[in-house]
Amino acid sequence: MPAIRNKIPKRFKWPAAMGALTLFQLISFAQVVLAPGGFDPTLALIFIGYIILEWLYCLTARLAAPQSSQEVEVIAFLLSGIGLAVCGSIDTSYALKQLIAIIAGAAAYLLLSALLKNLSAAVFLRIPAAVAALGVLAFNLVAARTVNGALNWLKIGSFSVQPSEFVKVAFIFVGAVTIDKLQSTKSLAKYAVFSIACVGLLFLMRDFGTALIFFFTFVLIAFMRSGDMRSIILICTGALLGAMLVVYFKPYVAERFSTYRHIWENMDTGGFQQTRVLIYSASGGLLGLGIGEGKLRQVYAASTDLVFGMICEEWGLLLGLLVAASYAVLAVYCIKASRTAASSYYSIACVAAAGMLLFQTALNIFGITDLLPLTGVTLPFISRGGSSVIGSWALIAFIKSAGFRFKAAAQPERADIPISKNARAGRDAV
């Protein structure tokens, strides 16, 4: 194990970070509450409750684990708070539902974090998790309803749930445990079969954005374990050939991306959303037009798929850059934490989760600006929607797990299983 793994990162000054975050949120929330349309006391209580929730979590976490730091949670609270403000600027009921989703997501994060501290339990649960993930996706094909051409929403009472957001968690959980447990070509083959099944079911559901996210995460995990670039090239080549066959036999797949790089020729049809995002975002300037003054909020999916454009228009480009920088900081933390993780499982899980979140962010931001095809994926932590928020919070448990240095000390990497030169290179390269 490299000597760097014994180093302890500098202590994160969370009181200063939380103080700055609270000040920023008070200003942002006040703008929403005092926006034209009248003072809404319910909305004010929602925002105050959110700030109290943040401080209660940080104080409790500090008392329960004085050695730990809260960098990851502060970033998640920042992004979730921005999403809460966006929802509140549209409708108070949206803000309430978003707050409930954030609380549920934080609970999922805590539960998964507790589970990840016990590697034996994680190994035991990998097969049930894989079966459950495939079962949920298969059930979607039968019971889900079609939304925007994708068969990916389940109606449970008065709630709509997107199961693929939760399957993302199982995808990383199963992959990291399986590959770390066996550390061989056989383990990669097993995970490849599971990955192909997940991606195939997502294609049948026409949820191409999530399918791309799963494939990218599989490639990332495979490289982390093997460090063999030739194998990754073969995997990507095979995936490209498979995609070409799908397009040939299923022409509707190509139709979903027919307006890519041609949005201005299709301003009122397939390129309607992207052109409005570009036009209205540019009109916001550095400081924005003001809460409720934007036109993008009138476009379909403004608070979900197009939320980054709405932020740039009403809050300004500066806040948009802050959002993008927050994801970049999360990536930097992941790189540093994965190098000091006490187990290769934590390294793989940390990088895979961060990679999944960053790739989804890139698909969202670059998709709505026509730099990439529009896939309809959400912006992690910010987009309105309970499934997306809960799934995003659960994923950061894997990122946080790389900091389990003291708990994991009793569960070192097993010396009885040799680690290949390529595998060590793949792990240490990240």
Image: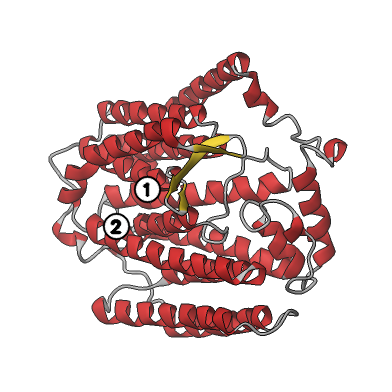
Mark 2, residues whose alpha carbon is within 10 Å: few (<14), some, or many (≥20)? many
Q: Which mark is residue 336?
A: none
> Observer-nearest residue: 118 or 335?
118
Which residue is found at the position 26% from the left and 76% from the top?
Answer: 65
Q: Which mark is residue 169?
A: 1
Which residue is found at the position 61% from the left and 34% from the top?
Answer: 149
The amino acid type found where label 1 is placed reads Val
Residue 227: x and y, percent? 39, 36
Label 2–label 1 contact, CB within 8 A: yes
**What residue occupies the far right of the structure in this picture?**
265
Mark 1, residues whose alpha carbon is within 10 Å: few (<14), some, or many (≥20)? many
Which residue is found at the position 64% from the left and 58% from the top?
Answer: 303
Which residue is found at the position 38% from the left and 31% from the top?
Answer: 138
The amino acid type found where label 2 is placed reads Leu
Secondary structure under badge 2?
Answer: helix
Residue 166: x and y, percent? 39, 48
Residue for badge 2: 112
